[in-house]
Amino acid sequence: MSNLRRSAFGKFACAFALTACSLWGSHAFAQTGYQPSPENLQARREFQDMKFGMFIHWGVYSVLGDGEWVFHNRKLMIEEYNRLPLFFDPEKFDARTWVALAKSAGMKYITITSRHHDGFAMFDSKVSDWNIVARTPYKKDPLKMLADECHRQGIKLFFYYSQLDWHNPDYYPRGQTNWNNGRPDHGDWNAYLDNYMDGQLTELLTNYGPVGGIWFDGMWDKPDADWHLAKTYALIHRLQPAALIIPNHHQTPRPGEDVQTFERDLPGQNTEGFNTKYVSSQLPLESSDTLNDSWGFNIGDSKYKSAADVERRLVRAAGNNSNLLMNIGPMPNGEIQQEFVTRLHAVGEWLSKYGDSIYGTRGGPIAPGDWGVTTQKADKIYVHVLNWNAPLLALPPVTGNITSAHSLLDGAAVEFTQNVDGMVLKVPPAKIEETDRVVVLTVAKAK
Ligand code: JFZ
């Protein structure tokens, strides 16, 4: 969608962003009085400990190799798009390979598109036959295989679920991304939300074992609509109390939501122009991004980020107390292109050495800066020097007395001074290709 963002979509996004903040008020209070259950609070802590996840955008749109917005971008008619499932037969799809790749990258959870804006269900849904089992020659449920494999390999599985639907006639009145694709000019919004969406969410939270949560997207298409959030959020928390609700609505979190996620931005940064600058101090945070420049498979997109770039984004996310959800768009035959595999393996290799300074940590205690960030866990503070060339690094004071400092990589002692005004570290010289120089401070809690 990237090239779009600067084109039609960009104009739409800015217009949309402007309207959104004014019109949200009316339906802001989703699950008022929501008290997260003990299981949900535990799941939130585990989510924060995981730090790194694999985002997967995969659907019948992958066949056209032009991203997940191709239905909209080419202004296709429904009967034209209805042909796509006929060509979707991912004989090379292997859940074990996908889950093993995520694990080899050091990723602890997977978030996959159970259905995107084209409304096509990538699972065996009895709510509608617009799904992979009923409409493709593949006739199998890849989410079932993935769920079983994730449970087998100890990886948590989350489902991306689009509230926006360009295919269902009951998605009516239409939204800001609408075009005349042949749907009748009438429909039943309540039936869409209460029967169709809640029906499919019930299937996803009943037929696939324990689910990490639901990653919603698409409310931005109808900013002033009543999305029945209170009912839908209560349904999810009733069916699976530990499931986390993660809404990509780019707005201030509402009651009933369990994680705040930022798209293509670190928390509070709004370089994309559609993210809120509000950062919750209560909810776990997540930042999503693409390994190349596209969410869905895009045959012409070779703008790959380097492994070092991904590592730095992961470190900066952790330093901002956030997870990183890094996206790949598998090919229509079910294979994952080598350029993604190579980079993910390299990141996994890096995490096998630096993982202690990421997993299970929280951001801080020193605020992020251009020079780098800090993460903390138990009596350790990890100083991640990402962008600093001088031999000495002066940092603000921290609570407690630093009793030792050493390089995470080789354990070598690091010289430091500490007083009430702060500390000065003698930063180890950067080694070739060293993405992140990590100095581990051991802190004795102030008496
Ligand atoms: C949304 C989806 O549209 C996209 O396909 C992908 O799934 C991504 C993770 O999330 O991307 C958006 C949606 C809305 C805006 C920007 C990106 N917006 O409102 O500016």
Image: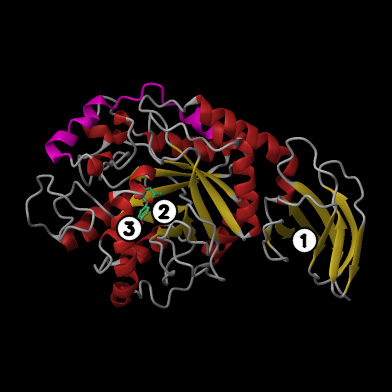
Q: As drawn, is 101 to the left or to the right of 230?
A: right
Instruction: Answer few, some or many: residues within 10 Å of disc 3's Cα (few below 14, many 20 plus, some between 14 and 19).
Output: many
Q: Earlier in the sequence, mark 1 or mark 3?
A: 3
Q: As drawn, is 188 to the left or to the right of 36?
A: left
The image shows residue 79, relative to residue 241, as above or below, that is above
- Residue at 48 percent across and 64 percent down: it is 258
Question: What amino acid type is highlighted by mark number 2?
Answer: Trp
Based on the picture, tell me whether residue 276 belongs to the magenta stretch: no
Q: Earlier in the sequence, mark 2 or mark 1?
A: 2
Question: What amino acid type is highlighted by mark number 3?
Answer: Ala
Verify CB contact (< 8 Å) between mark 1 and mark 3: no
Whether the residue under disc 3 has CB within 8 Å of ligand 1: yes
Quarter of image, res 392: bottom right
Q: Which residue is mark 3?
A: 13
Badge 2 element: strand
Mark carried by residue 215? 2
The residue stretch that appears in magenta: 76-99
